[in-house]
Image: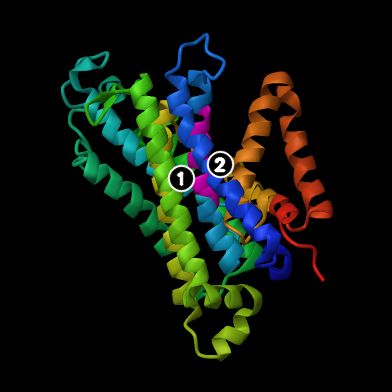
Amino acid sequence: MSASLAVPAPGGFGRMTLRLVLIGAVLVLALLPALNRLPADSALHVSDFIVSITGKWITYAILALAIDLAWGYAGILSLGHGAFFALGGYAIGMHLMRLIGPRGVYGHPTLPDFMVFLGYQELPWYWLGFDHFPFAILMAVLVPGLLAGVVGFLAFRSRITGVYLSIITQALTYALMLAFFRNDMGFGGNNGFTDFKELLGMPLNTSAARSTLFYASLLLLLGALWLCSWVAQSKLGRVLVAIRDAESRVRFLGYDVTRHKLFVFVLSAMIAGLAGALYVPQVGIINPGEFSPGNSIEAVIWVAVGGRGTLIGALLGAFSVNALKTWLTTVAPDLWLFALGGLFVAVTLFLPRGLIGLFSRAPK
């Protein structure tokens, strides 16, 4: 997908319409928890399910933003961003497990239930510090960033690009999935983490917790959108687009391509990790299935459907595809994968700019 197709034409009715749609969408989202507090018989009442599922979609939208920053602007097609998302989720999951304490099934003051069941005598060293929320959030950012830094440095230094880089990132998330399935890794094996009790002294599975996590996710989404927009519109963003379109020419001009690509890849992974950290308290579980390569591929499809290289298109794709998934898996669950593939093919053939192209001016 070329740059001319990926980015809507600047100015004009299309850009103003996008801004109005974005502002309206944020206002509607911000109202949902308030409408949830209305009496159940009110015509404006929003159910707990709607608030919970929308909060989850917001974290997916943050993940889509992260992917679009790397893929849409730097041409780094990662099929492993689901791994960074899951690592952030595991970091906050470890914190939530530490907070359970003696309220667990086995009543151990330090060890989570699965460690007691597996015969652990003491807490592994890499679990130390996770009883503190700031440390857990720091790890949700640093661990995905460090992994992306190592993988990115080795790949970009060797000038691995295109489908080869995609295969490497996909292999990475598959390897992590297999590793986290092992009981001796100390991360709960195939069951993962669940049965969370509280976060920051706030009991989970309550309306107050749902609203707080919802607004925290919305604030992170707006912050991530601002940060990604700032990067995209800066000189760095223009260099990244040039790298995407003609990497060899940028090298010839004297730019350090490896450093530029590494920066945006690490930043993208850190944003994905934060999204995962907000996802887990809302869904109440994290297990190795989150590392599934299919999750990363599906997230890339969100961006492609919404419109690569536009940021707002990534948000539109994440919300629209997941809304379709929620509805279709309810009425006809066996058809979802066929519908997802058909949607991707249809958008590629008939909407090469993605859904966001519907708001842009027609090319002259």
Q: Nearer the viewer, mark 2 or mark 1?
A: 2
* Label 2 vs 1, first from the N-terminus: 2
Q: Residue at x 58, y 44 (%)?
A: 293
Q: Residues within 10 Å of mark 1 (few under 14, many from 20)?
A: many
Is 215 situated above or below 245? above
Q: In the image shown, does 360 or 236 lie closer to the viewer? A: 360
Residue corresponding to mark 1: 85
- Bounds of the magenta span? 53-64
Q: In the image shown, does 127 or 57 lie closer to the viewer? A: 57
Left or right of residue 196, residue 305 in this image? right
Q: Position of residue 348 (x, y in %)?
A: 78, 53
Q: Residue at x 42, y 61 (%)?
A: 267
Q: Main secondary structure of the magenta part?
A: helix
Instruction: Give the numbered dot on residue 25.
Output: 2
Q: Position of residue 87 (x, y in %)?
A: 40, 44
> Label 1's element?
helix
